[in-house]
Image (cartoon, rainbow, N blue to C red):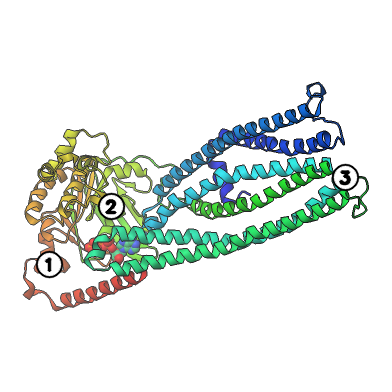
Amino acid sequence: MSENPIWLLYSEYGTGRRYAVLGAVATILGRGFGLIPAFVIGLAVDAIFLAERPYTLPLVPESVIPGTDVTQLYFSIGILLAATVAGAVASWIEDWGWSVFAQRVQRNVRVDAYEGLQELELAYFTSRRTGDLMSVLNNDVNALETFLEDGLSATLWIVATVVGIGLILVGLNVPLTVVTLLPIPALAAFTLLFTRLIEPRYLSIREEIGDLNSRLENNVSGIEVIKSEGAERFETERVAEASDEYLAANLSAIKVRITYFPGLNVISGVGFAITFLVGGLWVLGRPAFGLTGALTPGAFVTFVIYAQQFLWPIIRLGDVVDDYERAKAAGSRVQAVLAREPAVRDRPDARPLAVTEGAVTYDDVRFAYSGETVLSDVDFAIEGGATVGVVGPTGAGKSTLLKLLPRLYDIDDGAIRIDGQDVRDVTLRSLRRSIGYVSQEPFLFFGTVRENIRYGTFDATDDDVERAARRAQAHGFIENLPDGYETRVGERGVKLSGGQRQRLALARTMLKDPAILVLDEATSAVDTETEALIQDRLAEFAADRTTFVIAHRLSTVRTADRILVLDDGQVVEDGTHEGLLETDGLYANFWRVQTGDLASLPREFLERALRRQAVVDLDDEESEDLSG
Ligand SMILES: Nc1ncnc2c1ncn2[C@@H]1O[C@H](COP(=O)(O)OP(=O)(O)OP(=O)(O)O)[C@@H](O)[C@H]1O
């Protein structure tokens, strides 16, 4: 039981249990009220119409029961009506209790699953499809609710009915009850077979809906490429394919399901027919199986009505088992997210980072993305307050190198230290508060320009926001937007140009005022004139903090205190602009390319560049195939 995903979720998230208890009590009471009519009808037939036995009711004192047949009829009708009204009230309370319970569990599971997901390391997200994760948080969590809302109450209803009616049947007629119970083993075996067949099918439906969601999410995000490449028909076909697979998974489950329900009906129907046959013969005075004694028609009517009610819950059991199997498939996916431990997390004894100088050292750092080594033997020490340029060919590992600093990924070997403190020994929160990372493609949230700049420094005043925007050379264009700082920028900031987005991201980081700044091609999309203005402000901003600047435009890093040249995951040159020109290595050749001095480029540099380009192209083709 402890392994069962539904049980795990229930035991952890059933915070609204008092509603479930209310629902449960109402379910049982409702079932009790539902049992009254058949009893009263049977009694009325025997006592009023056939006068075969006296009119007595259990738990009701004889003095209350009327004496004549007509008043006994009125009395019976009164009981029937009262039982109906009481049943309706119980049913309302039952639905309310179970629904509130299920909705609360659903809410709690979703919030917790989101929180757990958010804690997971970045690598988890880069290796998964957004649409599939959305599907877990949305569809799978919703699927749980269906079972919790109806399934649990139905289970209780079934148990209450089977036990209640079972006892009544035994009280009415033991031999006939045994006959009525005959189909139960067949029903159980049939249900077991059903669960075996349906489980893998429901799991495959959950997976297919995740696939379909991923496709849809990917396409909506990439709509610009689809349109500009005229790939509409191609994408419609891909969506149709994913939909076909979802359809096939559904049909496969439907085939099993629609066989199960009629199967249950046939088994219980045959069982009922046998009960009716044995009981009917008995009433006619020809008891089978050596039965003795007499059976009155009224007692038989009561027994038959109850026996039929005994079989209903078994049919309903089909629905419950079906709902349960669906919820189990969904629950196992939600559980997989909840059970995952983040790979990058605080150590139990983690202390907050204390930045004094802002000195950064990389000691023999090695790092691999899922087995593929990207950085090796990286070893350098940066003094606090220095501005460090990081350059190198595309794919050399520049971004990766600096993503290791705020522990977006954890290194495989060596150590990274800030003012002597290993980044793995300090709290993630303090580490990330101390580092401002501006990426090449900054992400803007759906919201206003002001909200986007304030993101992360939520207590900043409007004046602070504006000051940061001025520093990032963003104030001017923001003022020209239709609603200024209140302009909504849409998902990912699509209403802004690349350069404008970069300036908002810069403003966001300047507002955060981190001790260490990482600019990863942070001004690559702005024009050179604006870049010069930003550089000017940045120099001022960077003056008293350690700053890493990744750039392809070497003019951006020319004035840096130090420049690290990366090639193929290793630091191959390290020095100032002038020093590196003197060394006349990779950096000097990059400089020749950017100053248009192509004639003096050594031949092997060009050959290497061509070879590297070929490798990059090949990589691109491979990744394209995989994503398709
Ligand atoms: N999330 C990831 N998972 C797996 N491999 C990755 C991931 N991110 C980058 N890589 C690989 O790591 C290598 C280094 O990438 P990185 O982005 O650090 O290079 P870069 O020098 O910053 O390149 P560019 O100048 O083009 O931005 C590349 O081969 C890239 O394909």
Q: Are marks 2 and 3 in contact (CB under 8 Å)?
A: no
Which of the two discs, 1 and 3, labels the residue nearer the N terminus?
3
Q: Residue at coordinates 37% horizontally, 58% vertically from top-left?
A: 413
Q: Residue furthest top?
A: 63
Foreground disc of the pair 1, 3: 3
User: Which residue carries the number 1 mark?
Assistant: 588
Check the picture and name the quadrant holding the C terminus: bottom left
Residue 262 locus on image (x, y percent): 65, 59
Foreground disc of the pair 1, 2: 1
Which of the two discs, 2 and 3, labels the residue nearer the N terminus?
3
User: Which residue carries the number 2 mark?
Assistant: 361
Which of the two discs, 1 and 2, labels the residue nearer the N terminus?
2
Circle 3 — which element? Answer: loop
- Note whether ligand 1 is within 8 Å of mark 2: no
Residue 271 locus on image (x, y percent): 76, 55
Give above or below for 201 relative to 12. Answer: below
Q: Residue at coordinates 36% horizontally, 45% vertically from top-left?
A: 428
Circle 1 — which element? Answer: helix
- Note whether ligand 1 is within 8 Å of mark 1: no
Tag 3: residue type? Leu
Q: Is residue 512 left or right of residue 627?
A: left
Ligand 1 shown in quarter:
bottom left
Q: Which residue occupies the foreground of this view, 396 or 573?
A: 396
Q: Residue at coordinates 10% horizontally, 58% vertically from top-left?
A: 555
Tag 2: residue type? Thr
User: Which residue carries the number 3 mark?
Assistant: 295
Circle 2 — which element? Answer: strand
Residue 348 locus on image (x, y percent): 45, 43
**Whether residue 188 can be seen here:** yes
Label 1 crowding class (10 Å Cα cut-off): few <14, some 14-19, many 20+?
Answer: some
The alpha-carbon separation of the residues under discs 1 and 2 comes to: 25 Å
